[in-house]
Each structure stands twice: as C-alpha cells, then as structure tokens.
Image (cartoon, grey):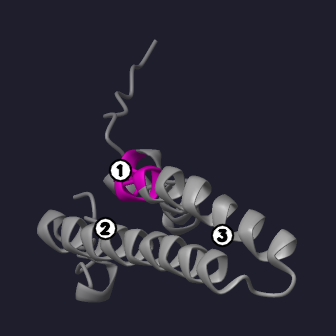
Amino acid sequence: MVKRQAYQPILITDASRSQDDQLNSRQKRYVLMMGIRVACLVVGAILVGAKAPLLWLWLPLCGVGMVLIPWLAVLLANDRPPKEQHRLANKLHHHRTDTPPTALPAEESPHKVIDAEP
C-alpha cells in the first residue's frame, strides 16, 4: 500500500485577485494619472498667464508631465499580473515544497520478487 501525500489546503491569502478587482484598480490608477496630467496642464497655463518667476524651469517640468504621464498611464493600465504558471515565485515555491521520493519498505515494494529455484 502506497501512502498518499498529505492534503495541502489552499490558503485564501494565496488566492489571486479577481479579474474584476484587477481591472478596477487599473482603472483607478489610470484616472488618477490622467488627473495629474490635467493638473500639469492647468498649472502650466496659470504660470504662463501670471508670468511667474522661473518660468523657464516650471514650463518644461509641466510639459514633461503632460507628455510622460499619459504614456505611463496607458502602460500601467494595460499591465496585468503574470499568470500563475509564469510567476518565478510560484515555480520556486513548488520546488521547495516538493518532497523527494522515499523508498518503499520491502513489504510494500511494487515489484513482486519471485524465488526461482535452479
């Protein structure tokens, strides 16, 4: 009789987030980043209208924010977590928990020994 491996329950803390939850968080991050872009545009317009000191410094910073933030927002909004079979942590976790095969006692050997007399 071969002993079966002990049942390993799946912990709820190990469960991945639902697709709806992932999509919702990506949408919130996208809206937040686009809000920052709009703020850069408004601040740039206010600085130009008010002829603020150090305008040569602030306008390029606002311009960089208006150009880079939409690009990053789209990249991050389309970014999903890797699938379970592709996660390195998952692969390492399985290798650590796998137990090496153990030898069966002689009475539980899967092969029958036949005593043949010459």
Residue 86 sits inside the magenta stretch: no
Q: How far apart are marks 2 and 1 (CA)?
A: 8 Å
Q: Quadrant of residue 80?
A: bottom left
Q: Residue 114: which quarter of the image?
A: top left
* Residue bearing mark 1: 78
Q: Label for residue 62?
A: 3
Front-most of residues 22 and 12: 22
Q: Is residue 39 depicted above or below 103 in this figure?
A: below
- Disc 1 marks which amino acid? Asn
Q: Distance between the residues labelled 2 and 3?
A: 24 Å
2 over 97 or under it: above or below: above
Residue farthest toward the top in the current orientation of the protein: 118
Tell me the element at label 1: loop
Who's the residue at 23% across and 75% down the image? 7
Q: Mark 2 highlights which residue?
A: 26
Amino acid at circle 3: Cys
Q: Which of 88 and 99 is in front in this view?
A: 88
Q: Which residue type carries mark 2?
A: Arg
First-in-chain label (2 vs 3): 2
Question: Depth-wise, is mark 2 or mark 3 nearer the camera?
Answer: 3
Query: Callout 2: few (<14), some (14-19), or many (20+) C-alpha neighbours within 10 Å?
Result: some
Q: Where is residue 38 in the image (x, y as percent from the top left)?
A: 43, 72
Which span is picked out in magenta?
A: 74-85
Q: What element carries label 2?
A: helix
